[in-house]
Image: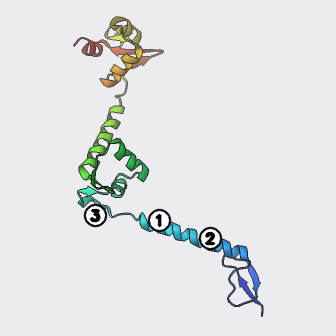
Amino acid sequence: MQIEKRCQYCNKKFIAQKVTTRYCSHSCNQKHYKQKKKDEKVQKVKEDTKAVDLVYIQQKELLTPTEAKQLLGIGKTYMYKLLSEGKIRSIRITPRSIRIPKTEIENYLLEQLNKEKSKVQPPPTTLSNNMNFYWSISEIEKIYEISSKALYDLLKRNNIRKLQKGAKVYVKKSDIKKIFDL
């Protein structure tokens, strides 16, 4: 008895010797078996990491690391790194059970937001025609005997505008006097 069939794995036509034959060759059978096993593993992982309902998470006061990472939108490894570095504090209920207060997540987010705000510097303005109100960086270094790195750090920390004209960088005298002549 010969029956024309299609292979379930490669979808090629073949002549089957039995009614129950599903594959054109032993290798297609093996490949399909391995593919099914792989798909089962992927499905199991998807079920394990099923998205937790955010409304449910927002009602809770103590979160598991998995819930916290989903709330922050970060990966598991980075979540545990934040916990180990102490950037997010946690409560150890049992030796294997960690809970994170929701206030810690909010504090971490506010801290990150403040860091981003401090990175943004006000846009530089144009120099006025009267250069008597400005000092160049090299002049400030000589007057106050400070290195350029230390000066730039002070300018950044105090959020002072630097104005560039050509190759030179200028800063208002009044701003520099506020820092050094306290």
Q: Is residue 56 visible?
A: yes
Mark number, residue 126:
none
Residue lying furthest front: 95
Residue 160, percent across and down?
A: 32, 22
* Disc 2 secondary structure class: helix
Q: Earlier in the sequence, mark 3 or mark 1?
A: 1
Q: What's under tag 1, amino acid-wise?
A: Val
Q: Which residue bears the numbered disc 2?
A: 34
Residue 3, percent across and down?
A: 75, 90
Residue lying furthest top: 143
Q: Residues within 10 Å of mark 1 (few under 14, many from 20)?
A: few
Mark number, residue 56:
3
Q: Residue at x 25, y 52 (%)?
A: 101
The span from disc 2 to disc 1 (Cα, nearest Å) is 17 Å
Q: Which residue bears the numbered disc 1?
A: 45
Contact between marks 2 and 1 (CB within 8 A): the answer is no
Q: What's under tag 3, amino acid-wise?
A: Tyr
Q: Looking at the rendering, which quadrant does residue 169 occupy?
A: top left
Q: Nearer the viewer, residue 71 or 121?
A: 71
Residue 162, percent across and down?
A: 37, 20
Q: Nearer the viewer, residue 21 or 106?
A: 21
**Is residue 77 depicted above or below 113 in this figure?**
below
Q: Earlier in the sequence, mark 2 or mark 3?
A: 2
Q: Nearer the observer, disc 3 or disc 1? A: 1
